[in-house]
Amino acid sequence: MQKFSAWSLLKQSFGGHQGWQPQWRRASPKPAYDAIIIGGGGHGLGTAYYLAAEHGIANVAVLEKGWIGGGNTGRNTTIIRSNYLFDESARLYDHALKLWEHLSQVLNYNVMYSPRGVMMLAHTVHDVQVIKRHVHANRGNGVDNEWLSPEDAKAFCPPLNIESNIRYPVMGAALQRRGGTARHDAVAWGYARAADALGVDIIENCEVTGFKRDANGAIEGVETSRGPIASRRVGVVAAGHTSVVLGYAGIKLPLESFPLQALVSEPIKPVVPCVVMSNSVHAYISQSDKGELVIGAGTDAYTSYTQRGALHVNSHTLEAICELFPAFRRMRMLRNWGGIVDVTPDRSPIIAKTTIPGLYVNCGWGTGGFKATPGSANVFAWTIARDEPHPINAPFTIERFRDGFLIDEAAAAAVAH
């Protein structure tokens, strides 16, 4: 009988071919690079890929203190959508969604993008008014979204409970048919392999401990646990820890970090055909390709860098799911986990140059990080390569909090804030 190593099975399962080897695991830092990206998640690896693929900057190092995809990229709930309210957000998230649609072909790697639809429920008159406002705003921006009656919502998702005698009866829903899910960590692996093939160095177990600056204050490199590395361009995209990293350069950001929790059930046969989100009952659910029900909760009420969170948050979430989907009441949960999200005062990201020449930042996504991955990486690479923002991320500056030009997407962030 032919024997297979664990690594060969992993390559077969996740799309690796026989000739490919994980070269970034052997990468050692060079003395100098044209650009350094701090953070080996989807955004960081994607930024490195687009720097090489679209801007011809391949002498790039991605520095990750742990292992690639081991942070929030490996802890998200897989949801992709672009039904955000404001013009700036709609452009950014729909840019990402358009890239998601062809990402597997571009990277030659199956990220398991599935446009199964994202349905957001309304339970009160206020919900109806707010969600209809989102529908109209989205359609005005060329983003697909439509209003469904309770009966239409149940027809689209048969397990949904639309009885009138529940605590929060379903009064309607908004449906973005182009929304859906993707494999949560496959995007990191896909970008890593594609970036590696273009010459990018991906260096794991390399924690950044400080910045090196020249006599004029501009960036000239970083200090790491594996020694100093020189570069005149450094992009920081370390979800949950950006404020810590930029603190080494003396920069303070309007960020708070919160645990964000989720959990999955035992696997069952396909029963949930789409993503269902509810703000009023504070939960959302979809089903993975393995059959698990993927259930998302909200952020904890306190700031923390833990990846556990409070037990009562998950209890509240499961109560909500059992009300919306009574058929799931006897199911068992397999595991739960927590990520760490950076949250800005207006719940929108920062993708911008900093006040220090050569230092750039991409942070503050809250719950929007995974769905924005390709678009975020694409415009951040543009910003680093050209030392100016892409038109899509130009509004997402640090200075907007000083000047009052907020992009308040708390409502569109759905259940987490």
Image (tube, grey):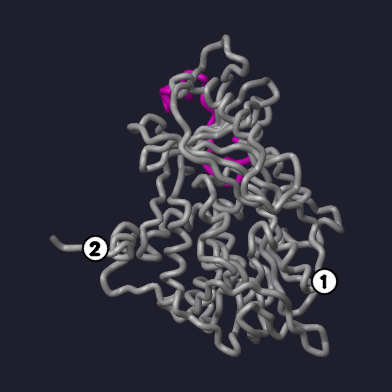
Q: Crowding at label 1, few (<14), some or many (≥20) Cα neighbours within 10 Å?
A: few
Query: Is residue 132 something one can see in this rendering?
Result: no
Crowding at mark 2 (Cα within 10 Å: few <14, some 14-19, many 20+): few
Q: Secondary structure at mark 2?
A: loop
Up-down relation of residue 5 to residue 185 (above or below): below
Type of amino acid under label 1: Gly
Query: Based on the displayed image, in which of its 4 quarters is residue 312 positioned?
Result: top right
Image height of 312 relative to 159, above or below: below
Q: Classify residue 28 as left or right of residue 297.
A: left
Q: Which x, y percent locates residue 355?
A: 80, 73
Q: Secondary structure at mark 1?
A: loop
Q: Which residues are magenta?
A: 135-160
Q: Which mark is residue 4?
A: 2
Name the residue that disc number 1 marks.
250
Q: Residue at x 51, y 65 (%)?
A: 68
Asked if the stretch drawn in magenta spans residue 152, the answer is yes
Quarter of the image with the C terminus is top right
Quick one: quadrant of the N terminus? bottom left
Q: Residue at x 68, y 80 (%)?
A: 222
